[in-house]
Image (spheres, helix red, strand yellow):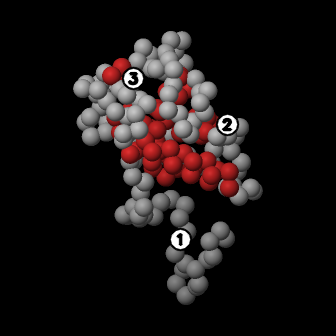
Amino acid sequence: MRGLVPFAAGVVLCGAIVTAAGQAPTQPPAATPADDAAPEWLPKELKNLKVLPKDIEPKQLLVVMRGFTQAMGVRCVYCHVAGPDPSDMSSYNFESDRKEHKETTRAMLKYTEAVNEAFPKGVGEEPKAGELRVTCYTCHQGQREPPTKKPDGPPRTGAPAAAPQGQPPRPPGL
């Protein structure tokens, strides 16, 4: 479980909020973690936490969930069961495991934590305290499905240039 709350904080910094298939409200829930009062719809007692710490504060959990919306470009209804009106957050059944995306998210949280734990020491700059090297956004980049093919078009700035004619290509990193 170590590292999940900092992971969530890292996720929050990434991406843009996108409406998932028009099934959810176009605006995020009104409260922000800095607000004094939690939104009325936020459960006071959290249930069915299997990966996140069981003692996480409801407002901190909201920060984690908003991080998922930003990193993956989805909304609450992607993982949680909504009531008849998906814009009414008080009608959601947050503890239900009926949607497979919720279990997938749990598995990916464990995977991301394992990647961060196994990340080779001395490779690149060390992350600041409370930050992680690998987050949901690292792969998803604001999309439900992480890109698995390189984008079309010219290489991004910083890509190695082709070797001049008649010379062998330079090895990576030189």
Residue 131 visible in the current orientation = no
Q: Choose the circle earlier in sequence order: 2 or 3.
A: 3
89 sits left or right of 129 in the view = left
Q: Quadrant of residue 42?
A: top left
Q: Position of residue 131 (x, y in %)?
A: 64, 40
Quadrant in the picture for the N terminus: top right
Of callouts 1 and 3, which one flags the residue occurring earlier in the amino acid sequence?
3
Residue denoted by label 2? 130
State the SS at label 1.
loop
Query: What's the residue at 58%, 85% (across, down)?
Result: 167
Q: Amino acid at mark 1?
A: Ala
Residue 29's tag is: 3
- Height in image: 153 above or below 33? below
Give amino acid for label 2. Gly
From the viewer's perspective, is 51 left or right of 97?
Answer: right
Tell me how far mark 2 sits from mark 3, CA to CA. Answer: 25 Å
Helix, strand or loop for disc 3: loop
Residue lying at 41% horizontally and 38% vertically, measured from the top left? 97
The CA span between labels 1 and 2 is 36 Å
The residue to which callout 1 is attached is 161
The foreground one among 48 and 58 is: 48
Please, what secondary structure does the residue beneath circle 2 have? loop
Asked which quadrant contains residue 28, the reply is: top left
- Residue 93 marker: none
Choose between 56 and 141: the one closer to the eye: 56
